[in-house]
Image (spheres, rainbow, N blue to C red):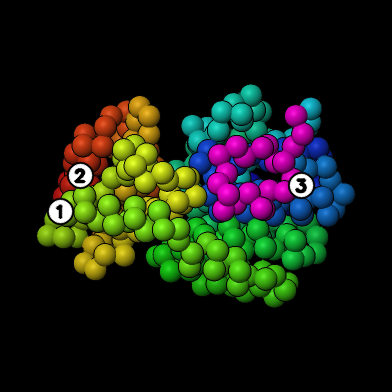
Amino acid sequence: MTYLEAAQFLKEHDNYLILTHKRPDGDTIGCAVGLCHALRAIGKTAWLLPSRGATALFRPYLEGVEAPEDYVPSCVVSVDIASLGLLPQNAQPYRDRIDLAIDHHPSNEGFARENCVEADKAACGEILYKIVCELGPLTAEIALPLYVAVSTDTGCFVYSNTTANTHRVAAALMETGIDYRPANKRHFRTKSLKRLKLEARMLEGMHLYEEGTVVIAAVTLDMVRELELTEEDLEDIAAFLGQIEGVRHSVTIRQLKEECKLSVRTAADLNASAVCALLGGGGHAAAAGCTLSMGPVQAEEAILKAIRQVKYG
């Protein structure tokens, strides 16, 4: 389904419930909130499924848009979700009744009745921008969360996925008069003292491979407990290691209770999605992830083996 067909679909239905993925980031929340406001602006009833995993960094955007407990939707839409495995627990009742999925991941599984997927877009927010412009006037209320979606998924427009189209979309959103400066300060230039201590611990424990071009570091449960870290302190931690001079490919291992979540960021000579696919994950060519039922040490061995297999065959 094209974005024009997706917009027409949204015009023809009503009573929407919008789903975000577990451990929600700025792209999924920004897209969901922007779409919710756009649908309401044309007289539709629209709510977001409560995003229980949202950190304090994103909670302000969710005010007034999370569905009441007794809400019964007629149409379910997911945004920035590539697979059913990324649905949070409270979205499980809707896994077989998603009517429209809007996404930008090449690994999208096509799980919805209708799928609007543009894998060449840096952020799902770029697709939502086109769709909401077809629904009605682009207001600041719609534009701010979409700007957050685009800016956070591109690291404030510095990641390699950023394109000329990304900048054009951001400019159009800014022209609505949104107050983007505080958003950029909040999301990209503010770190808690605990976050800075975490980064120091990661540097102390990191391992360099392939003549310093590959770096792997873990955030363990012990580190989270000792530093008293919150989810907000851990926001976008996967981007940190790639700032080290000489590093082309980085892996951040986040230890959870019984598994590890791996975030892989790569340069053009290594496909991150192909690496993670070997371990049951996926994503984009430059940014992908997977979840492994093992400890950090074993996870590091597994991801390093996958990197070398993709890189050298």
CB under 8 Å between discs 2 and 1: yes
- Residue that badge 1 annotates: 209
- Residue that badge 3 annotates: 64
Identify the secondary structure beneath mark 1. Answer: strand
Q: Quadrant of residue 92?
A: top right
The Cα–Cα distance between marks 2 and 1, rounded to whole angstroms, is: 9 Å
Identify the secondary structure beneath mark 3. Answer: loop
User: Does residue 153 appear in the picture of this structure?
Assistant: yes
Q: Amino acid at mark 1?
A: Tyr
Q: Is residue 168 magenta?
A: no
Q: Position of residue 88 (x, y in %)?
A: 55, 33
Q: Is residue 57 magenta?
A: yes
Q: Residue furthest right?
A: 43
User: Front-most of 235 and 121?
Assistant: 235
CB under 8 Å between discs 2 and 3: no
- Tell me which secondary structure the magenta stretch mostly adopts: loop
- Residue that badge 2 annotates: 304
Identify the secondary structure beneath mark 2. Answer: helix
* Earlier sequence position, callout 1 versus callout 3: 3
Q: Report the residue at 58% width, 57% height from top.
A: 149
* Earlier sequence position, callout 2 versus callout 3: 3
Q: Over which residues does the magenta segment extend? A: 48-69
